[in-house]
Amino acid sequence: MNIQIITVGKLKEKYLIQGIAEYTKRLGAYAKITMVEVPDEKAPEILSEAEMVQVKQKEGERILAKVADEVHLIALAIDGKQKSSEEFAEGLDRLATYGKSKVAFVIGGSLGLSEAVLKRSDEELSFGKLTLPHQLMRLVLVEQVYRAFRINRGEPYHK
């Protein structure tokens, strides 16, 4: 399985970089993982609604430029479907079984994802109603993908 994780903004925090690198290394036994960072749109701290939409649109264009047509796109969105780790694992296994071996997860910037990205996505996934920093979400996502592969192989870890 080829998994692409597309994110907005550059990761700077050393502890997050190290954690993501560790899970990416572990995932190498199960899938090819590619991390793609697109630049975030520079904007003032306080934005009008129209300015927020504009920022998300520009970031969305950068995201969509990285998504091939045949890719099954999963958008991480707070209003998406919540799943248990087992349900998430089952979904990934089902994609692989039915020929969707190219999967991309997309994590938006601090304002979220544009309507165009949400419209292009094949599904929206939520990790809960809590708001998490988008940089931290990268680590949470890569850990859950690793956990999913362990669950699907019947290997210990997911307790």
Image: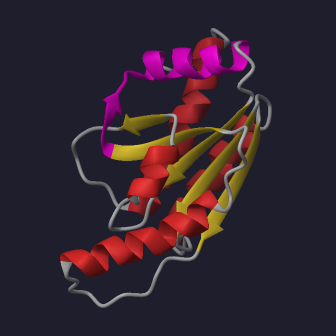
In percent of the image, x 22 and y 47: which residue is there?
Answer: 130
Q: Answer with left or right where residue 16 lies relative to residue 45.
A: right
Across and down, in percent, residue 11 comes to 55, 70
Q: Tell me what residue is drawn at x 57 percent, y 33 percent.
A: 145
Q: Main secondary structure of the magenta part?
A: helix
Picture layout, residue 132 above or below residue 55: above
Residue span colored magenta: 78-97
Position of residue 38 measured from the top left corner of the image (x, y, whole percent): 60, 70
Determine whether 51 is above or below 150 in the image.
below
Res 134 seen here: yes
- Outermost residue on the top side: it is 154
Residue at horizontal 64 percent and vertical 23 percent from the top: 149
- Quarter that holds the N terminus: top right
User: On the rendered structure, is 47 left or right of 107?
Assistant: left
Is residue 159 at least partly visible in the picture? no
Residue at 52% from the left image edge and 34% from the top image edge: 122
Residue 82 position within the rendered picture, expressed as x and y whole percent measured from the top left: 32, 29
Residue 72 drawn above or below residue 155: below
